[in-house]
Image (spheres, rainbow, N blue to C red):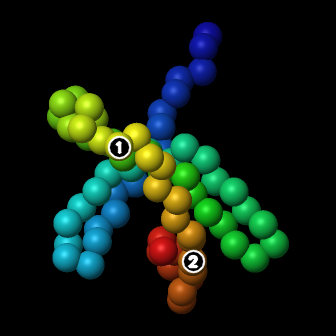
Amino acid sequence: MPEEFNPDIVTLSDDDGKEYTFEILDAIEDDENRYLALLPVYADPKSLLDDSGELVIVKVEEEDGEEFFC
């Protein structure tokens, strides 16, 4: 039986409270840091056509046991 594919989806908010949804494509770790490659996800397929196609790279940081993205 083929293995099911379920993408890792995260929703992030900017400083103004606007929410953005991304699919986590990959994670890279070195001795001190972890980075995620994110691809925007859109509910409306037409919005995907207007997207630049660029990846969003974020650094994962931890504070008081809680992860946040920079």
Q: Can you tell which of label 1 and label 2 is closer to the viewer?
A: 1
The disc at residue 60 is: none
Q: Find residue 31 and report its horizontal and vertical position in percent.
A: 81, 72
Badge 2: how crowded within 10 Å, few (<14), some, or many (20+)? Answer: some
Residue at numbered disc 2: 61
Along the viewing direction, whichever of 15 and 11 lies nearer the viewer: 15
Q: Find residue 15 and report its horizontal and vertical position in percent.
A: 26, 78
Q: Residue reaching furthest bottom?
A: 64
Q: Secondary structure at mark 2?
A: strand
Among numbered discs 1 and 2, the one appearing first in the sequence: 1
**Vertical relation: 6 (above or below) 11:** above
Residue at numbered disc 1: 52
Q: Inspect the image, locate mark 2, and give the three-letter code of the amino acid beneath it.
A: Glu
Q: Is residue 17 left or right of residue 38?
A: left
Quarter of image, res 36: bottom right
**Vertical relation: 18 (above or below) 48:** below
Quarter of image, res 20: bottom left
Q: Residue reaching furthest right?
A: 31
Q: Find residue 21 and report its horizontal and vertical position in percent.
A: 32, 51
x 48%, y 33%: residue: 6
C-alpha separation, residue under disc 1 versus residue under disc 2: 27 Å
Which quadrant would the N terminus be assigned to in this image? top right
x 48%, y 49%: residue: 55
Q: Inspect the image, locate mark 1, and give the three-letter code of the amino acid beneath it.
A: Ser
x 52%, y 65%: residue: 58
x 20%, y 66%: residue: 18
Q: Find residue 35 and report its horizontal and vertical position in percent.
A: 62, 63
Numbered circles on residues, count: 2
Quarter of image, res 49: top left
**Vertical relation: 21 (above or below) 6:** below
